[in-house]
Image (cartoon, helix red, strand yellow):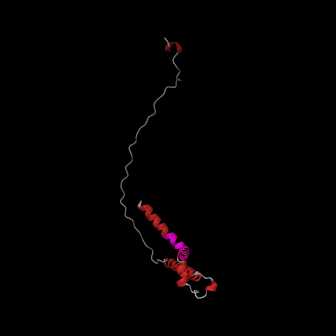
Amino acid sequence: MINRLVAITLLLALISANLSRFFIYAEFKVNQKYIAAALCENKDKPQLHCNGKCYLMKKLKEAQDKEKKQEQDAQKKGAQDVFIVNNPMLLSFNSTKTKKEKPALISFDLPKFSSEILHPPPFNTIFS
């Protein structure tokens, strides 16, 4: 149960990073009336029929810029992970060797069969 909960949480965290534009668009649709009335840059120009789309485009551009910046930071961080070692590192492993015991030999002999071919008993001995 706990493993499943952790897996779902991590999956949602990974998906939320990739679906940030979807969340911005969903937030815009939910609050579109408020955005058009209070936050829209073109609210004094009703002939444009913006209805807050200017605010949406601004937020989408900010999200895209943020994603690019995070990607660049990740690339820089990845490039900094490389290091060079001038002196070779000597590793020594001290192991205690234990004497391996051999398993006892088990003798197995196949049963000895006679070379005669088995025949059913004679018919007259069965019913007599």
Q: Nearer the viewer, residue 59 or 88?
A: 59
Across and down, in percent, residue 89 comes to 43, 73
Across and down, in percent, residue 121 comes to 51, 17
Magenta-colored stretch includes residue 17 = yes
State whether residue 9 is above or below residue 29: above
Q: Quadrant of the N terminus?
A: bottom left
Q: Residue at x 45, y 77 (%)?
A: 87
Across and down, in percent, residue 90 comes to 42, 71
Q: How many marks?
A: 0
The quarter holding residue 93 reads: bottom left
Q: Nearer the viewer, residue 73 or 17?
A: 17
Q: Is residue 85 left or right of residue 61?
A: left
Magenta-colored stretch includes residue 110 = no
Residue farthest to the right, as pictured: 47
Q: Is residue 102 left or right of residue 75?
A: left
Q: Residue at x 43, y 61 (%)?
A: 3
Q: Residue at x 50, y 13 (%)?
A: 127
Q: Nearer the viewer, residue 12 or 85?
A: 12
State whether residue 115 is above or below residue 105: above
Residue farthest to the bottom, as pictured: 44
Give the magenta range: 13-27
Q: Nearer the viewer, residue 92 or 15?
A: 15
Residue farthest to the top, as pictured: 128
Q: Residue at x 52, y 12 (%)?
A: 124
Main SS, magenta region, reads: helix
Across and down, in percent, residue 116 comes to 52, 23
